[in-house]
Image (tube, rainbow, N blue to C red):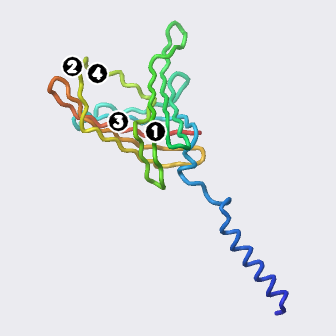
């Protein structure tokens, strides 16, 4: 082979290596992909009281029930959940829940400082006749799927509620499905 052929071969190989190191072609990581406003499409809500399943329901977002979460680049978030009620065929806000806090995401590790609101609104059971005290509070979150346009988060909230010296253990799981 002559020198020109060797030079061209060397140039093509060098060009190939530099293309492989181009950061513009890198796949975005979870920290950058999660940033933005996400609209909940579906929530699977399960509640256990003293280790006995009490509620197992799936809610689908609609014109009268919706929820969203805004993840910001500064690692803060805010979620909003609204259920409208119809009185005399006029929609008005019936229930609203707001939460905000901080989050971290690194690879598959995901933490939230507060729970994200959902579209299931529990109407409550018995009347509380004392001031509840909450202990043993544990919240976990998993970011199970994140793409440019969809996200699936699994959360678990465990706590003990004590009213008038009677303690009740609760576990609530949520599977939250979002689109951007």
Q: Which mark is residue 55?
A: none
Q: Nearer the viewer, residue 168 or 36?
A: 36
Which residue is pictured at 44% across the width and 48% down the height? 110
Residue 145 point in image, percent of width and height: 50, 49
Residue under label 2, please give it: 130
Q: Dot 4 surroundings within 10 Å: few (below 14), some, or many (20 or more)?
A: few
Residue under label 1, please give it: 176
Residue 180 point in image, percent of width and height: 59, 39
Image-based side of 25 in relation to 42, left or right: right
Dots 4, 1 in contact, CB < 8 A: no
Which tag, 3 or 1, sits closer to the chain's start?
A: 3
Image-based side of 151 in relation to 159, left or right: right
Residue 96 point in image, percent of width and height: 46, 22
Residue under label 3, please give it: 46
Residue 88 point in image, percent of width and height: 52, 6
Against 131, residue 156 (above or below) is: below
Cα distance in 3D space between marks 3 and 4: 15 Å
Cα distance in 3D space between marks 2 and 3: 26 Å
């Amino acid at each position: 082979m002559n020198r020109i052929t060797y030079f061209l071969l060397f140039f093509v190989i060098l060009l190939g290596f530099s293309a492989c190191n181009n950061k513009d072609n890198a796949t975005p990581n979870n920290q950058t992909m999660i940033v933005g406003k996400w609209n909940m499409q579906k929530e699977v809500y399960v509640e256990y009281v003293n280790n006995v399943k009490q509620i197992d329901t799936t809610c689908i977002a609609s014109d009268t029930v919706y929820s969203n979460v805004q993840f910001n680049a500064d690692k803060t978030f805010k979620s909003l959940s609204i259920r409208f009620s119809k009185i005399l065929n006029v929609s008005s806000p019936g229930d609203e829940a707001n939460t905000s806090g901080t989050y971290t995401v690194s690879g598959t590790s995901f933490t939230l400082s507060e729970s994200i609101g959902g579209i299931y609104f529990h109407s409550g059971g018995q009347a509380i006749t004392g001031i509840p005290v909450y202990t043993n509070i544990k919240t976990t979150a998993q970011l199970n799927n994140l793409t440019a346009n969809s996200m699936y988060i699994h959360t678990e909230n465990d706590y003990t509620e004590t009213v008038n010296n009677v303690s009740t253990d609760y576990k609530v799981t949520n599977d939250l499905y979002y689109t951007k």
